[in-house]
Image (cartoon, coloured by chain):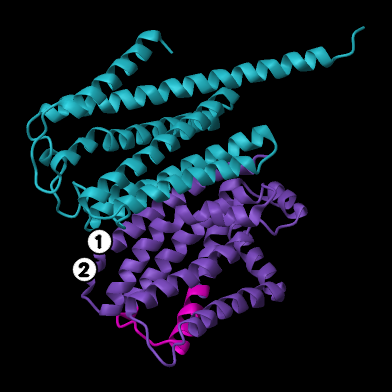
Chain colours: A purple, B cyan
């Protein structure tokens, strides 16, 4: 437990020290949102809520894949040896998942802010939307952390990261889009309960699998 | 593979083709004679799912106790599964063209199937980009397991939540609507068995080819050794 906290703390410290990476991710997010804004020429015409949520999740997906990818891919060799001596693989993957969840959540909140700034503010049920953001961040981070571990061992890791992760996260994404649509329309919460529970179940499966399978990736 | 299994596979599929094209089928609106596609399209999917399951089992076995043979089986099961999946998707598109009006209808199950194929194609890309054999086997086994369980909700759960034109989802009646008279079952279940057995046969053949190739390489290595 202590090592877990230490590792998470270490992630944050490292992240805060590498300012270029943070600003890179933020800029990436900003450019994506801006490209959406320009290509749909949104000052003249508005988009439907369905398009809004699809665009929003696409932008989030792309920036999240890129930012989580570096959780194992960009690391130097020395760091791995340091991990080996310090903690068991289970603790490492848990720390990565928790850290990435927070990162994803921050990213999606920033994305939400930018979206409401440049496009319209379409969400009516904010609490529901926030819960969705938390759950999907968790789902994204647990699946992407494991896949980043796999991809980091290969020669062309960046392409593989995208190829391997998209089919896996589609289930999470579909659920998220559905709930977002409900949150936009302001349907009463009971209607989205099914999807929320589904999302939670998918998250549990993904996290359990990541926890079980990660030691096999680690051992090399 | 035992030869009686091979014979069973061939006999079953001959029976399915003859019976599927000639036997009496229920007359239903829109479906009409295209209902015969049920004998070919659906069993292929069942066969694919069974083969992917087998691939999953061998992947798990590999992780528990690393043995290159298990890895070969996992790969070949996935290979043949993809083949059946592509055939199933093509036959489904032909069927959809006549009953739904267009080959690709954006049906949730259709999309789920396409994604399932993507997963296994990604699996092969992953294998292609790893050089070390042991590492390739281990990492692809991990991805195989992870992707399979991440994919299950796609094929089995999501289509049932949303409206789909496939039977058994979105309030549509299940399979039993079609084979009310159990005549269709008499061709359908043998068809599932037949496609699965043929797939199994191909897998065993391909694993044998791999074994022979491996042996040839070994022999070549020995021949290359300098003579004393």
Name the one closer to the observer, A86 or B227.
Answer: B227
Q: Mark 2, chain letter?
A: A
Confirm or deny contact between disc 1 and disc 2 (CB under 8 A). Answer: yes
**Residue B143: mark in rendering:** none
Assign a secondary structure to mark 1: helix
Q: A162 above or below B63?
A: below
Left or right of A152? Residue B173 is left
Q: In which quadrant of the rendered view does residue B219 lie?
A: top right
How much space separates mark 1 and mark 2, taking CA atoms?
Answer: 7 Å
**Residue A194: mark in rendering:** 1
Q: Is residue A212 magenta?
A: no
Query: Residue A176, percent across and down?
Result: 37, 66
Please tell me which residue is depicted at 66% across the width and 70% down the height of the picture.
A15
Left or right of B31? Residue B94 is right
Q: Is disc 1 in the same subunit as disc 2?
A: yes
Q: In which quadrant of the rendered view does residue B220 lie?
A: top right
Q: Which residue is mark 2?
A: A191
Please tell me which residue is depicted at 36% across the width and 43% down the height of the picture.
B90
**Boundaries of the magenta span:** A107-126
Question: Which quarter of the image is occupied by the N terminus of chain A?
Answer: bottom right
Task: Give the farthest residue toward the top.
Answer: B228
Q: B26 above or below B207?
A: below
Label 1 Cα neighbours within 10 Å, binned few <14 / some 14-19 / many ≥20: some
């Amino acid at each position: 437990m202590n090592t877990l906290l230490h590792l998470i703390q270490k992630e944050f410290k490292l992240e805060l020290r590498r300012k270029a990476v943070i600003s890179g991710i933020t800029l990436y997010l900003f450019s994506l949102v801006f490209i959406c804004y320009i290509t749909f020429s949104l000052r003249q015409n508005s988009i439907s809520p369905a398009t809004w949520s699809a665009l929003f999740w696409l932008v989030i997906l792309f920036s999240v894949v890129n930012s989580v990818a570096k959780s194992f891919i960009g690391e130097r060799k020395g760091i791995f040896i340091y991990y080996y001596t310090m903690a068991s693989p289970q603790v490492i993957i848990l720390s990565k998942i928790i850290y990435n969840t927070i990162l994803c959540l921050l990213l999606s909140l920033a994305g939400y802010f930018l979206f409401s700034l440049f496009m319209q503010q379409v969400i009516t049920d904010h609490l529901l939307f926030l819960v969705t953001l938390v759950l999907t961040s968790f789902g994204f981070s647990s699946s992407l952390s494991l896949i980043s571990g796999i991809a980091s061992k290969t020669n062309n890791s960046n392409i593989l990261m995208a190829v391997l992760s998209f089919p896996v996260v589609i289930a999470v994404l579909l659920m998220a889009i559905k709930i977002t649509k409900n949150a936009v329309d302001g349907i009463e919460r009971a209607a989205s309960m099914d999807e929320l529970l589904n999302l939670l179940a998918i998250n549990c499966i993904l996290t359990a699998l990541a926890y079980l399978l990660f030691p096999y990736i680690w051992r090399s | 593979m035992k030869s009686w299994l091979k014979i069973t596979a061939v006999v079953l599929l001959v029976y399915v083709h003859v019976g599927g094209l000639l036997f009496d089928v229920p007359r239903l609106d829109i479906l009409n004679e295209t209902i015969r596609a049920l004998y070919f399209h659906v069993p292929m999917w069942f066969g694919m799912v069974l083969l992917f399951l087998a691939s999953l089992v061998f992947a798990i076995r590999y992780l528990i106790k690393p043995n290159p043979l298990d890895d070969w089986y996992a790969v070949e099961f996935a290979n043949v599964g993809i083949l059946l999946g592509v055939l199933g998707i093509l036959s489904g598109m032909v069927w959809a063209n006549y009953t739904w009006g267009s080959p690709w209808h954006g049906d949730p199950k259709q999309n789920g199937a396409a994604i399932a194929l993507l997963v296994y194609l990604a699996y092969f890309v992953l294998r292609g980009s790893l050089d070390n054999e042991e590492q390739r086997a281990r990492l692809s086994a991990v991805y195989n397991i992870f992707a399979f369980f991440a994919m299950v909700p796609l094929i089995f759960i999501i289509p049932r939540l949303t409206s789909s034109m496939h039977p058994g989802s979105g309030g549509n009646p299940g399979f039993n609507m079609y084979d009310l008279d159990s005549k269709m079952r008499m061709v359908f279940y043998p068809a599932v068995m037949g496609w699965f057995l043929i797939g199994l046969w191909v897998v065993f053949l391909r694993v044998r080819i791999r074994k022979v190739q491996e042996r040839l390489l070994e022999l070549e290595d020995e021949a290359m050794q300098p003579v004393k």
